[in-house]
């Protein structure tokens, strides 16, 4: 049902485009303007003909003279070159178009616009040269009552077009200015809008991938094709050598546009295999190369211009068939972008039909050719597809983000519950194991004191049991310490370094005096603050001072120094104790690691806890030690203001 709806929508689009093209044919067509019409080399003009808002297009009644004919009747647009379907003669050379202007009315200043002359030209009036150049031009002159001979002489060596193929327009300067202004604004819109979209796609190249890149190429190709108007316009004021070869640039841009349309259809639908695309790509790249070759051979091989024209039509027909086949696959595969690709294919087909069947029957007055309208519609439709696709991706990303956030909240809740259960388990386990561990120690001591039946072998077993029992006691003590640390759940507060060091000194100075160790605290000259839980800071310094007291002999020193440095707070704890061997320094912060000198008294958790608290506060800790001279722990914390 949905596919049928898409097909009906496509048919409706085709009907609307056909209606629009018919409207253009009757309202914006040089070949469908009211008389006067030329005949047998003469056109009769009146004052009223020059007063109307639409110029008089000099289409009919010209007399052509070239190397093969003399004053042969023709109309402008009948032949695209001087070959005139005779494949044995050159399509280039010299030609003269002559028309008699029989004017009845008051003398007045008029102008003639020559829109697209892809060759050198000379315009004469009554044998007097009015203008010379290449590309396009506007000639202004005084038209008096009577008969005047208007002649246009052309000369070409290269190119697909030769002679005068596009009808000139005659009217007042104001009328021609209005018409050209409207056309200039229209072409400026057709060039700038695609270029703006191409620039926009630059921001999508990373996220949009190949789809965004080929859309950018499509926009640039169309903009280059439509730049013809401005290249010919500026050729009025200064010579542009590339004008005579612009037909080749237009052809290349059109081939690139067709290639991008099909590639976008393939990428958007996702219903075409890479193998099928590679086969189509061979044709889409090989035939344009052949067409360019024939275009370059036109000056050498007279029949190359005919082959080039027929191959170009063949290329457009086959390109449309490929696009239609890929579009049908995308609709069958129910691709999300199929509604866009089908409409684009319909527009592509409408432009092809118009290009084939309206040749030499239509030339716009103010706006574009039909296939140029279709190119603009393709750019806008694919642009709308890119916008819709980006919006869809953003919505999907938002939905995915919301889903992930919900999952994260659920997982966080589960992990928090699991951690709480783990804390409770270890707390209960440490509490329950204390009694049997210390009871075992009591039994061992009782056996030793009684001495009954204690021989050397049993003494060895008792020593091993006591060592294991002591190891178990140390582990239980570590668990108790970790549980006490986990129970600190208060929020972080603003802590003064001077105040916390003052508390540390007050707490541990008595213990240091008992050990005959000098405890010195040097607070910072300028107080600093950090965000922390005071209880954890107390545990941090307690572990460092406890280790230092064990390692420092009587009359030794323990010095705690602090500095504030920009956004950092530096705290050093230094002792004059026995020091730590060099090979043990990398291991001191590991959990349950006990140095060789502390195997009987250490738990292996003190420095591990210190390292964890420092890291939790966003700081770093380093250790430096020399055996026999002492140890220094250096900590840095982020400072708040």
Image (cartoon, rainbow, N blue to C red):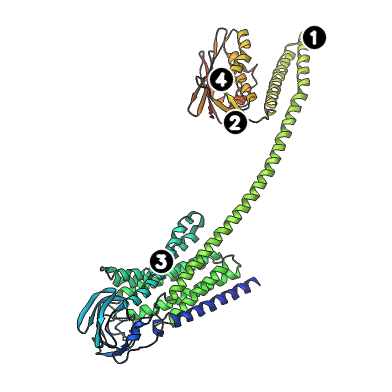
Name which of mark 2 and mark 3 comes first in the sequence. Answer: 3
Q: Which residue is mark 1?
A: 452
Cα separation between marks 4 and 1: 60 Å
Look at mark 2 in the image and give the residue it sits on: 616
Residue 208, horizontal then vertical, whole percent: 51, 57
Q: Measured along the vertical axis of the image, is residue 272 above or below residue 436?
A: below
Vertical arrangement, residue 74 with respect to residue 624, above or below: below
Q: CA distance from mark 2 to mark 4?
A: 21 Å
**First in sequence: mark 2 or mark 4?**
4
Q: Nearer the viewer, mark 2 or mark 3?
A: 3
- Rounded to the nearest angstrom, the CA distance separating label 3 from label 1 is 109 Å
Would residue 157 be seen by someone viewing this image from the given angle?
no
Extreme residue toward the left, this view: 128
Where, by quadrant of the figure, is residue 499 drawn?
Answer: top right
Q: Between marks 3 and 4, how big is the CA–CA gap?
A: 70 Å
**Residue 591 % position (x, y):** 62, 27
Q: Residues within 10 Å of mark 3 (few under 14, many from 20)?
A: many
Q: Quadrant of residue 190?
A: bottom left
In this rendering, does residue 552 appear at all?
yes
- Tell me if mark 2 has few (under 14), some (14-19) or many (20+) residues whose alpha carbon lies within 10 angstroms of its own: few
Q: Which residue is mark 4?
A: 498
Residue 141 at x, y percent in the picture: 25, 79
Callouts 2 and 4 close, C-beta under 8 Å? no
Tell me the element at label 3.
helix
Residue at 60% of width from left, 70% of height from top? 332
Q: Is residue 159 left or right of residue 448?
A: left
Q: Nearer the viewer, mark 4 or mark 1?
A: 4
């Amino acid at each position: 049902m949905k596919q049928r709806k898409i097909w009906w929508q496509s048919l409706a689009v085709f009907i609307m485009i056909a209606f629009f093209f018919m409207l253009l044919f009757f309202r914006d067509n040089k070949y469908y303007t009211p008389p006067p019409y030329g005949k047998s080399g003469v056109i009769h003009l009146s004052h009223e003909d020059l007063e109307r808002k639409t110029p008089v297009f000099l289409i009919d009644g010209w007399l052509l003279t070239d190397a093969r004919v003399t004053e042969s009747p023709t109309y402008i647009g009948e032949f695209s070159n001087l070959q005139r379907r005779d494949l044995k003669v050159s399509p280039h050379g010299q030609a003269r178009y002559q028309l008699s202007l029989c004017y009845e009315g008051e003398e007045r200043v008029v102008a003639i616009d020559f829109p697209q002359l892809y060759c050198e030209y000379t315009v004469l009036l009554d044998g007097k040269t009015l203008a010379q150049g290449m590309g396009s031009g506007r000639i202004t002159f005084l038209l008096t009552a009577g008969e005047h001979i208007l002649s246009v002489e052309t000369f070409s060596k290269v190119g697909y077009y030769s002679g005068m193929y596009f009808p000139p327009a005659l009217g007042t300067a104001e009328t021609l200015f209005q018409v050209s202004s409207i056309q200039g604004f229209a072409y400026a819109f057709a060039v700038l809008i695609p270029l703006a979209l191409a620039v926009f796609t630059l921001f999508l190249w990373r996220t949009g991938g190949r789809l965004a890149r080929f859309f950018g190429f499509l926009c640039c190709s169309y903009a280059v094709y439509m730049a013809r108007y401005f290249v010919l316009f500026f050729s009025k004021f200064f010579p542009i050598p590339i004008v005579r070869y612009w037909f080749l640039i237009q052809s290349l841009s059109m081939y690139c546009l067709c290639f991008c349309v099909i590639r976008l259809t393939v990428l958007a639908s996702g219903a075409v295999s890479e193998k099928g695309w590679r086969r189509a790509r061979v044709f889409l790249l090989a035939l344009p190369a052949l067409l360019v070759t024939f275009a370059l051979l036109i000056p050498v091989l007279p029949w190359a211009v005919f082959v080039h024209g027929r191959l170009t039509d063949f290329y457009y027909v086959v390109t449309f068939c490929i696009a239609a086949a890929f579009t049908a696959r995308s609709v069958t595969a129910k691709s999300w972008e199929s509604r866009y690709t089908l409409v684009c294919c319909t527009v592509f087909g409408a432009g092809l039909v118009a290009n084939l069947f309206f040749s030499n029957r239509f030339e716009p007055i103010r706006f574009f050719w039909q296939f140029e309208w279709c190119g603009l519609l393709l750019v806008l439709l694919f642009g709308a597809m890119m916008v819709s696709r980006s919006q869809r991706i953003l919505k999907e990303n938002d939905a995915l983000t919301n889903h992930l956030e919900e999952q994260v909240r659920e997982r966080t809740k589960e992990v928090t519950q699991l951690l709480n259960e783990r804390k409770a388990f270890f707390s209960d386990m440490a509490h329950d194991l204390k009694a049997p561990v210390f009871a075992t120690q009591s039994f061992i001591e009782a056996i030793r004191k009684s001495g009954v039946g204690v021989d050397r072998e049993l003494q060895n077993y008792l020593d091993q049991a006591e060592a294991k029992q002591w190891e178990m006691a140390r582990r239980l003590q570590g668990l108790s310490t970790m549980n006490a640390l986990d129970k600190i759940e208060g929020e972080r507060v603003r802590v003064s370094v001077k105040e916390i060091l003052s508390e540390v000194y007050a707490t541990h100075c008595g213990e240091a005096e008992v050990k005959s160790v000098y405890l010195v605290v040097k607070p910072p000259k300028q107080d600093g603050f950090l965000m922390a839980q005071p209880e954890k800071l107390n545990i941090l310094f307690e572990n460092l001072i406890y280790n230092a007291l064990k390692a420092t002999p009587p009359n030794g020193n323990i010095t705690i120094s602090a500095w504030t440095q920009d956004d950092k707070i530096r705290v050093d704890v230094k002792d004059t104790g026995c020091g730590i061997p060099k090979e043990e320094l990398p291991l001191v912060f590991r959990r349950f690691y006990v140095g060789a000198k502390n195997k009987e008294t250490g738990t292996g958790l003190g420095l591990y806890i210190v390292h964890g608290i420092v890291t939790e506060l966003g700081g770093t800790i380093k250790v430096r030690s020399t055996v026999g001279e002492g140890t220094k722990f250096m900590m840095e914390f982020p400072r708040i203001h």
